[in-house]
Structure formats: structure tokens, C-alpha cells
């Protein structure tokens, strides 16, 4: 495994991290034993950045990661543990029904995450989504108090715009911003937000770097997705869009074959080639997929290969938005 620095003053992390969300929600039926084996294998492969959130299964994912961490102090000390707060759920439906980034909520959310994770500190604490009615200075100011108390080491934001990022960084140094970034979703990052990050020395942690599994080539039709799979609600997996998108995936697969790797590895290697400040966090709950993901860190693409992969997915070629409309409304504040 290769390693990168999380922002100017942040910790060293594996060039490819592990998104843990799918171990608990979103992609079919959870498998605790398999997830624990995946976390074990991540440690063996030198993957150090673990990403979770209090919203994933309303705390269930943090608890799962916490059970793995309880295997000993060595485990906790070997990882950079990242979690997020801000999304609130309707107790009746279980669905996200609001965003709370008030100063009063910050310490309560942190304490709850620490308890579920079974630890006394968070290495990276993100604002999951921002409530635009709450000044970002208020939110980050409250998070900075957690840093001073020793409960949090570094701060991050997720899915905010460049103006918000600047204001937040002026209040307290921000080490990372989490954004969706992949061959299928480039416009979110490749603009003023990336130039702002590089000016300020902030890392970009790329979530959904494999297009929620689409770019792996393992999804060949909407019908094969389980009824419990959240992707059935996602526009890019809809009946009217999926065939067009799978055609792009097949084209990426042809380029990957020329390179001598899998489509998954080509997509991740392409992201890594965008700069040393880009850190993908592909999610999986299976050790063999984790091994495939980790191997991408050893692939160095030539400039021509990077350009060819980019041209394989022309601007506006991907059909459908990256989120349903209700979720899109919470982004970019």
C-alpha cells in the first residue's frame, strides 16, 4: 500500500481507504461476519483510513466498526478513524428528515459517535451535510472545541461549496473535504472546489469512486439488484438510464483490458492519478473486492492512459443524476 497525507497538517493515510457504509445499509443484506473479515483484511493490506457516519443505519455502522476496534488497542492505533454528523432521522420512517449542524448538537453527536465506536477520540470528524441556515463558523467553532478537548484530531466537511470551505477553514483548519468523485462524477470536484482545496492545503476524500458499484462491471442489469438495495432508487440505475451507463462501463472495461487491470482498478488508478491530494474510499463488505481495490494503489497510469479513460466517458455522457432530487437538495451549501 502507498500512503498520502490528509491535508497539509493531517495524518498519513493509505492512498485507498475503506468506506464502511455498505457493511450496514444500502447494498443488500448486511453480513456481520463477512464485514469483520473485510476489516481484518484491510488491516493486513495496510489500509488505514476507515470511513463511517452516524447516519449509516442510524448508528449501526459505527457500532459495527466499534466491535472490530474492540479487538485491541493495536487496532485502534493502526487506523485513521473518520465519522460524520449532521443528518437527523425520522424515528417512525427511519429516513433522513433534516440536517442539524447547530453548535448545541455538535458535542452531543460527537459523544454518541464515540460511545458507539468504543473510542475516546475521532481522528477525522466531518460535517456530513450542512444546514445553510446555520453559519458554518458556528458549526466549525463548536467542532474546534472538540479538538481542544482532545476528542477530535482533525476536522472535515462534506459536499459543501468553495465559499463555505473558505469560511470554515478561516475558523479552524480543515484537513479534508469529502466529495463524490469518479469517472462518472467529475463536475463536482473539477472546478473551483478543487482549486480552493489546493490553495488551502485540503485533501479531497473521494466517495463513491466506483459509481456505487456501476464502474466495477459487476452490475449488468437493474433486475439483479436486491429489493433492499438502495440503488433501485438512484437515477443512474433506473430502467431508462442503466443501459446507456452500462455501455460506458463496457467501454471502460476495454481500456482496462489494454492496461492489464480490472475496470475497478482502472477507475481507482485514474482517480489516484488526479493528484496526491485525492484519496478514494471505495466501499465493500467482501475481502476479495477489498483486495482488488487495494491493488489499484500499485498501478501507475501513463498520461495517455489517464487521458484515454477520461475520454471514454465524455462530459454529459452519463445518464441520470447522482442522487434522487430530495438528496440533491442537501448538497453544495
Image (cartoon, rainbow, N blue to C red):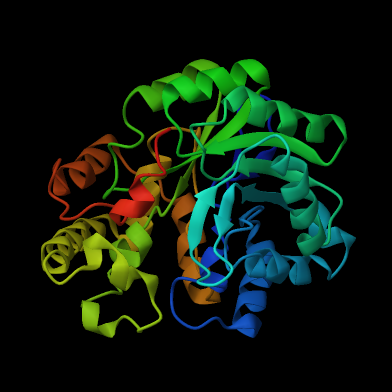
> Where is residue 221 shown, x and y percent of the image?
20, 78
Identify the image quadrant of residue 194: top left
Q: Residue 106: x percent and y percent?
A: 71, 41
Is residue 228 or residue 195 the one in the foreground? 228
Instruction: Name the residue located 74 percent from the left edge and 43 percent from the top edge.
Output: 123
Q: Quadrant of residue 214?
A: bottom left
Q: Position of residue 309 (x, y in %)?
A: 22, 47
Residue at x-position 73% and y-position 31%: 142
Q: Is residue 143 above or below residue 262?
A: above
Left or right: 333, with 144 as reference point = left
| Percent of width and height locating residue 303 | 27, 35
Residue 78 visible:
no
Q: How many marks?
A: 0
Say which of 261 and 38 sits in front.
38
Q: Residue at x 41, y 55 (%)?
A: 208
Task: Using the rendered image of the protein, determine whether residue 154 is visible from the camera's viewpoint.
Answer: yes
Q: Is residue 152 left or right of residue 31?
A: right
Which one is in front, 124 or 106? 106
Vertical position of residue 160 compared to residue 19: above or below: above
- Lateral position of residue 55 relative to residue 236, left or right: right
255 with respect to 114 (left or right): left
Assign the C terminus to one quadrant of the image: top left
Kindly indicate the quadrant of the structure image that contains residue 216.
bottom left
Tell me which residue sits at (30%, 57%) in the image: 324
Amino acid at each position: 500500500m502507498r500512503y498520502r497525507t490528509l491535508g497539509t497538517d493531517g495524518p498519513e493515510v493509505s492512498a485507498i481507504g475503506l468506506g464502511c457504509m455498505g457493511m450496514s445499509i444500502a447494498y443488500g443484506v448486511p453480513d456481520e461476519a463477512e464485514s469483520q473479515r473485510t476489516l481484518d483484511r484491510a488491516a493486513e493490506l495496510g489500509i488505514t483510513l476507515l470511513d463511517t457516519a452516524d447516519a449509516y443505519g442510524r448508528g449501526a455502522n459505527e457500532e459495527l466498526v466499534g466491535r472490530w476496534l474492540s479487538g485491541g488497542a493495536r487496532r485502534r492505533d493502526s487506523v485513521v478513524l473518520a465519522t460524520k454528523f449532521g443528518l437527523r432521522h425520522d424515528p417512525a420512517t427511519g429516513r433522513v428528515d433534516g440536517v442539524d449542524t447547530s453548535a448545541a448538537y455538535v458535542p452531543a453527536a460527537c459523544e454518541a459517535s464515540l460511545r458507539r465506536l468504543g473510542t475516546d477520540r475521532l481522528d477525522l470528524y466531518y460535517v456530513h451535510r450542512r444546514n445553510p441556515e446555520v453559519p458554518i463558523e458556528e458549526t466549525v467553532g463548536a467542532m474546534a472545541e472538540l479538538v481542544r478537548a482532545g476528542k477530535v484530531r482533525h476536522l472535515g466537511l462534506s459536499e459543501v461549496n468553495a465559499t463555505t470551505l473558505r469560511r470554515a477553514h478561516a475558523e479552524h483548519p480543515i484537513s479534508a473535504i469529502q466529495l463524490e468523485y469518479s469517472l462518472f462524477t467529475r463536475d463536482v470536484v473539477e472546478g473551483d472546489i478543487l482549486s480552493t482545496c489546493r490553495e488551502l492545503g485540503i485533501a479531497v476524500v473521494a466517495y463513491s469512486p466506483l459509481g456505487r458499484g456501476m464502474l466495477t462491471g459487476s452490475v449488468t442489469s437493474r433486475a439483479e439488484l436486491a429489493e433492499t438495495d438502495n440503488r433501485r432508487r438512484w437515477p443512474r440505475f433506473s430502467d431508462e438510464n442503466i443501459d446507456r451507463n452500462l455501455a460506458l462501463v463496457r467501454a471502460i472495461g476495454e481500456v482496462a483490458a489494454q492496461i492489464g487491470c480490472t475496470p475497478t482498478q482502472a477507475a481507482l488508478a485514474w482517480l489516484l492519478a488526479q493528484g496526491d491530494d485525492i484519496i478514494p474510499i471505495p466501499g465493500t463488505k467482501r475481502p476479495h473486492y477489498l483486495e482488488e481495490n487495494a491493488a489499484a494503489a500499485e498501478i501507475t497510469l501513463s498520461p495517455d492512459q489517464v487521458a484515454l479513460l477520461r475520454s471514454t466517458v465524455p462530459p454529459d455522457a452519463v445518464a441520470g443524476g447522482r442522487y434522487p432530487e430530495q438528496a440533491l437538495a442537501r448538497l453544495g451549501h
